């Protein structure tokens, strides 16, 4: 109202602004075209009652829910919060914002331990989360002593400790899948697209999904919400999700209305600023980004053609996973519907170390959010790093295959490392290291590698170092029969081979060669079907083949690829490169998707989302994890 001199301002999806009363008069006479740029409007302002609108269209309303939104009654039923004078809801939406977002709510002081290195046994004694499990698997158990073996594969398997507390019982709307003292509290910023294209069912489902997130955050967790369209605004600072905090957050989300263009970069800048400027810090910080459209503020080339936004240069360094200042803010991006910019959203997630999910069916948005926060609310390991050293004097490391995780190798190829970062409760990681095994006629056994893992316990805030390195050894007999290849190694080779084929097929499709892309996927599918794992009916191999087949179908022609194929492939690549669950596709057929990375906490949260009754929700089902029997999953 301030810039309008007392009159309301309407900002159209083309980003041009007008006095509300002026433009409604213009629209009333049938003019639905911007007077400035001549863009045709899809979302237009009305002053008439909804019953008077032409074609049964609903007017834009900043407070009312859509009339047919029966499943959102859980938010409507909340009692009006009893707020003190300093925390009025109206103050959350003032036009001006502070220059520095250091007005975050104070975190209650917790017992601080002196930082230092402790052993895994000592950490366990201090009632922390327990130790990471590290296992190694050589490609074969024996190599003839008079024979060398180049590119010999060794699998390094990590598994994060399980939660130390029990499951919350009682009301399913209780906030967390883990007890509050068994996990690290989180500072979560949600960056939400409220542009004109989100009008109607989309924004109703977004509000409903945000209601689920808010209800499941604990009192030590803090939330801030950024809404963006043509510009971005912070609805409220980082606030603890106590009962009052949750009610205020629900009311703030309830107030969202769709209008204007799509400025993803501005939304992310403001979201990152909330976490960078905060005065207090919870151990885990993350951003959830959702958008259903193309960034209408894309940089254009001199000839006027649109070029893809370079988010690496536009976004603050704090979002970059390889950025400085020790601050790492992963962005978990959700592309909503057929019109979102999957390539840009995937790029944002890769830059930051987050995941990219493709929400094809509108009704699954809450389940997708549930899966994501099921992980974020179960972080039990931080700053994990795997150290690899050659044990034999003549051994050399030839490669470290770790997907998108940062790896390094010394100049003499005698040592390497993998930066793993945060792990959710019971989350697993598999990395393949290849070495050149030398001739060794002096011994019946050869030590190949020593593998160590160090990480930070987010509860005790101490660095934990596993007491003993895991040593990889193979037998060196004079003669051996047919070597038996490790199923674990073969399985991970198949996963990496499939991910490489997906990346190559995507590159071919982007260059217009859909036939070549389909051929690459089919060749990989045939190769997988001939592996040892396939012959034993390995479920991961079967699931990978099904995923490759679905990608082939989504590359049938240019229209299908543009509407869903690109996003489906990119969400699959994100999942495999980070070994972390993503939502993708219409999420209705559990047989065609590899969700080997879904943790028990994620599964539990998705189940809560699917079983909570909000009236009559639309039919929806997020694809569940497939459990692969080679490594039994404790529950």
Image (tube, rainbow, N blue to C red):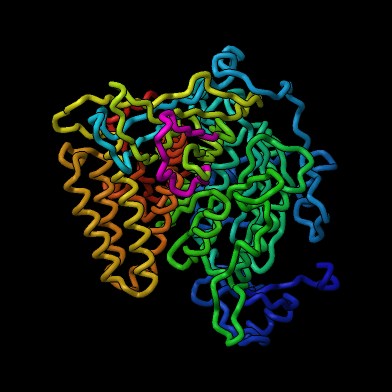
Name of the residue lying farthest toward the front = 442
Q: Is residue 413 left or right of residue 265?
A: left
The front one of 444 and 172 is 444
The image quadrant where one finds the N terminus is bottom right
* Quadrant position of residue 399: top left
Q: Residue at x 76, y 51 (%)?
A: 92
Would you identify the image quadrant in which residue 97 lies?
Answer: bottom right
Question: Which residue is found at the position 36% from the left and 35% from the top?
Answer: 155
Q: Is residue 33 at least partly visible in the picture?
A: no
| In the displayed structure image, the side of residue 80 where residue 377 appears, left or right | left
- x, y percentage for residue 385? 54, 35
Residue 560 placement: quadrant: bottom left
Q: Which secondary structure class fits the magenta region best? A: strand
| Magenta region, residue range | 385-410
- Percent position of residue 280, x then y: 76, 38
If the image is split into quadrants, where does the C terminus sit?
top left
Tell me, yes or no, whether the highlighted magenta stretch contains residue 451.
no
Residue 483 at least partly seen:
yes
Q: Position of residue 13 (x, y in %)?
A: 61, 74
- Taking depth in this image into account, of 128 and 206 the one nearest to the observer is 128
Point 37% across, 23% down: residue? 634
- Residue 574 at x, y percent in the picture: 44, 52
At 55% across and 76% down in the image, what residue appears? 307
User: With 537 as the anchor, is 505 left or right in this view?
Assistant: right
The residue most toward the top is: 125
User: In front here: 11 or 525?
Assistant: 525
Front residue (pair 396, 169):
396
In the image, is residue 204 above or below residue 303? above
- Picture layout, residue 398 above or below residue 572: above
Image position of 512 (left or right of 45) = left
Q: Is residue 460 above or below residue 542?
A: above
């Amino acid at each position: 109202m301030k810039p309008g001199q007392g009159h309301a301002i309407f900002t159209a999806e083309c980003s041009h602004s007008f006095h509300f009363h002026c433009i409604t008069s213009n629209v009333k006479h049938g003019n639905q075209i911007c007077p400035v740029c001549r863009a045709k409007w899809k979302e237009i302002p009305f002053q008439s009652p909804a019953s008077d609108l032409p074609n049964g269209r609903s007017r834009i309303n900043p407070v009312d829910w859509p009339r047919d939104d029966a499943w959102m009654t859980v938010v409507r039923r909340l009692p009006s919060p009893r707020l003190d004078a300093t925390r009025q809801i109206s103050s959350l939406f003032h036009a001006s914002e502070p220059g520095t977002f250091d007005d975050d709510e104070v975190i209650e002081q917790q017992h601080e331990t002196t930082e230092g290195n402790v052993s895994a046994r000592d950490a366990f004694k201090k009632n922390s989360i327990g130790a990471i499990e590290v296992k190694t698997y050589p490609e074969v158990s024996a190599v003839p002593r008079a024979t060398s073996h180049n590119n010999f594969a060794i699998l390094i398997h990590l598994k994060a400790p399980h939660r130390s507390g029990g499951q919350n019982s009682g009301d399913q709307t209780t906030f967390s899948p883990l007890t509050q003292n068994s996990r690290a509290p989180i500072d979560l910023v949600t960056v939400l697209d409220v542009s004109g294209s989100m009008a109607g069912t989309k924004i109703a489902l977004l509000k409903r999904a945000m209601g689920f997130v808010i209800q499941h955050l604990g009192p030590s967790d803090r939330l801030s919400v950024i809404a963006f369209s043509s510009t971005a605004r912070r609805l409220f600072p980082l606030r603890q999700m106590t009962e009052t905090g949750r009610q205020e957050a629900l009311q703030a989300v309830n107030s969202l209305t769709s209008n204007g263009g799509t400025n993803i970069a501005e939304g992310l800048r403001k979201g990152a600023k909330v976490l960078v400027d905060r005065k207090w810090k919870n151990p885990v910080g993350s951003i959830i980004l959702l958008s259903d459209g193309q960034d209408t503020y894309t940089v254009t080339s001199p000839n006027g053609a649109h070029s893809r936004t370079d988010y690496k240069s536009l976004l603050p360094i704090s979002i970059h996973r390889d950025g400085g200042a020790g601050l790492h803010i992963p962005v978990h991006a959700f592309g909503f519907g057929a019109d979102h910019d999957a390539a840009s959203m995937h790029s944002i997630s890769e830059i930051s170390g987050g995941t990219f999910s493709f929400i094809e069916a509108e009704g699954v948005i809450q389940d997708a959010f549930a899966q994501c926060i099921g992980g974020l609310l179960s972080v039990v390991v931080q700053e994990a790093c795997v150290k690899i050293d050659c044990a034999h004097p003549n051994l050399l490391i030839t490669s470290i295959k770790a997907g998108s995780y940062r790896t390094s190798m010394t100049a003499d190829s005698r040592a390497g490392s993998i930066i793993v970062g945060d792990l959710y409760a019971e989350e697993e990681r598999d990395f393949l290291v290849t070495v050149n095994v030398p001739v060794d006629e002096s011994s019946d056994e050869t030590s190949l590698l020593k593998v160590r893992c160090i990480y930070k316990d987010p509860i005790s805030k101490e660095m934990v170092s596993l007491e003993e390195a895991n040593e990889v050894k193979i037998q060196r007999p004079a003669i051996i029969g047919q070597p038996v290849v490790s199923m674990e190694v073969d399985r991970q080779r198949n996963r990496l081979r499939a991910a490489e084929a997906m990346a190559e097929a995507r590159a071919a499709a982007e260059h217009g060669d859909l036939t070549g892309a389909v051929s690459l996927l089919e060749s990989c599918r045939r190769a997988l079907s001939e592996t040892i794992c396939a012959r034993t009916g390995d479920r991961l191999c079967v699931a990978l083949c099904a995923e490759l087949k679905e990608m082939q179908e989504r590359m049938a022609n240019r229209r299908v690829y543009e509407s869903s194929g690109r996003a489906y492939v990119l969400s699959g690549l994100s999942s495999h490169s980070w070994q972390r669950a993503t939502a993708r596709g219409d999420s209705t057929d559990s047989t065609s998707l590899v969700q080997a990375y879904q943790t028990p906490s994620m599964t539990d949260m998705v189940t809560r989302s699917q079983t909570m009754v909000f009236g009559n929700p639309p039919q929806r089902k997020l694809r569940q994890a497939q459990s692969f029997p080679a490594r039994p999953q404790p529950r």
